[in-house]
Each structure stands twice: as structure tokens, then as C-alpha cells.
Amino acid sequence: MGEYVTISMKAAFKLDATAGIKRLSELVESLSKQYPDAAASLQEGLEVMFTINRLGLSRSLQRNLGSTNIPITTSYRLDFFRLYWLF
């Protein structure tokens, strides 16, 4: 079941927001009987998951903005350089 969910979610995120939400809503329905908590969690965050897709950005920019793996040190470096140029 885990592989099916992974494949379904990856396919949904390649679609535009409306079609992707529809695809994941179908996934929620299929999960609801056997995994009600997982289905409820997915349903709860469904609209928010497609925020970046709605912006009409390039695939590359969507991938970068959608990543939570950006090192935190990057933001500290940017802040340092901003302060450096201000003074």
C-alpha cells in the first residue's frame, strides 16, 4: 500500500492544482476504510499542498520552493550579507 500511495502522490503533484486535488481526493477515498487516520490527515492538508502549483511557476522553481531541505545556514548567510552592506 505504501508504494501505491507514493506513486499516486507523485503523479498528483505533476498535475495542475485542480486535477491534482481531484486525484488525491480519490486517494483519500481509497484509504478511508483501511487507514482512516492517514486519510483524514491527507484530506486536512489537501488544499495547502497545492499552493505552489497554483502560482504557475516553472517545474524547477516549484521543486525548489516546495523543498523543506534548504539548509538553514543559507538564511543566516543572507542576513549577514544584508547587514554587512547596510553598515
Image: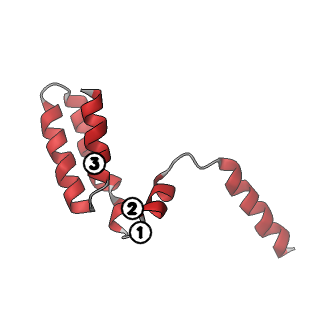
Q: How is the image coloured?
A: secondary structure
Type of amino acid at the residue the image marks with label 2: Ile
Q: Calculate the distance from the C-alpha at mark 1 to the C-alpha at mark 3.
A: 18 Å
Residue behind mark 1: 57
For residue 20, what is the image quadrant? Answer: bottom left
| Label 1 or label 3, whichever comes before in sequence order | 3
Q: Calculate the distance from the C-alpha at mark 1 to the C-alpha at mark 2.
A: 8 Å
**Is 53 situated left or right of 72 in this image?**
left
Residue behind mark 2: 52
Q: Which numbered disc, 1 or 3, marks the residue closer to the eye?
A: 3
Query: Residue 67: image x %, image y %?
Result: 50, 50
Proximity of marks 1 and 2: CB atoms separated by less than 8 Å? yes
Proximity of marks 1 and 3: CB atoms separated by less than 8 Å? no
Q: Which image quadrant: the N terminus?
A: top left
Query: Residue 32: image x %, image y %?
Result: 15, 32
Query: Residue 87: image x %, image y %?
Result: 87, 73
Q: Nearer the viewer, residue 87 or 12?
A: 12
Residue behind mark 3: 11
